[in-house]
Amino acid sequence: MMRPKLTEEQADQVYELLVATCAAPAVDKCQFVYGMTHGCSEYRICWKLGFGGKIYNDGDRLRVDGYLEDMTKPLKKLRKKVDTRLAEMVERWKLDGTWNPFEEDVG
């Protein structure tokens, strides 16, 4: 089965973005990096994105989202800002040849 994965460096960079934009706590970084490097395609992040806040690795892009009822104008603006920054990261990784989010699971 193919599952989207990030490299440890990529997951680290994504989490630093979440710290800077969404108030992600440093204590959760190891768990996030482990999940995103081991095929977790969605990860609940909450923080400034509300209780339903998640980051998704769709294989071709990274994005954040949350519950519709939590999406105030400030949250929509934050989500757009984070999604734009994530898209820039993915584009940079594609250009340097390090974006290969699918690896075959062997086991």
Image (cartoon, grey):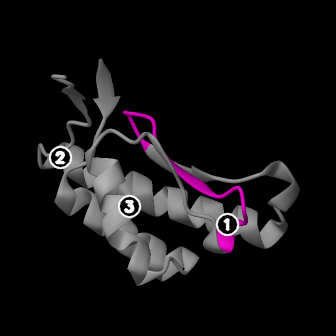
Instruction: Kindly identify which residue carries mark 3.
Output: 32
**Coordinates of residue 8 in the picture (x, y in percent):** 19, 58
Of tags 3 and 2, the one toward the viewer is: 3
Nearest the viewer among 90 and 34 is 34
Crowding at dot 1, Cα within 10 Å, few <14 / some 14-19 / many 20+, comes out as many
Nearest the viewer among 13 and 87 is 13
**Coordinates of residue 98 in the picture (x, y in percent):** 14, 46
**What is the distance, in whole Å, between disc 2 and disc 1 at their CAs?**
29 Å
Q: Quadrant of the N terminus?
A: top left
**Coordinates of residue 13 in the picture (x, y in percent):** 29, 67
Look at 21% across and 25% down and name the residue there: 105
- Give the residues drawn in magenta, as a range: 48-61
Q: Is residue 54 magenta?
A: yes
Of tags 2 and 1, the one toward the viewer is: 1
Is tag 2's residue or tag 1's residue first in the polypeptide sequence?
Answer: 1
| Residue 93 visible here | yes
Q: Is residue 92 left or right of residue 55?
A: left
Q: Is residue 106 above or below residue 80?
A: above
Is tag 3's residue or tag 1's residue first in the polypeptide sequence?
Answer: 3
Of all residues, the one furthest to the left in this rendering is: 97
Crowding at dot 2, Cα within 10 Å, few <14 / some 14-19 / many 20+, comes out as few
**Coordinates of residue 82 in the picture (x, y in percent):** 53, 64
Q: Quadrant of the C terminus?
A: top left
Of all residues, the one furthest to the front in this rendering is: 107
Instruction: Kindly identify which residue carries mark 2.
Output: 95
Q: Secondary structure at mark 2?
A: helix
Crowding at dot 3, Cα within 10 Å, few <14 / some 14-19 / many 20+, comes out as some
Mark 2 is on which residue type?
A: Leu
Mark 3 is on which residue type?
A: Phe
Look at 50% across and 76% down and name the residue there: 24
Q: Is residue 69 above or below residue 17?
A: above
Instruction: Kindly identify which residue carries mark 1.
Output: 49
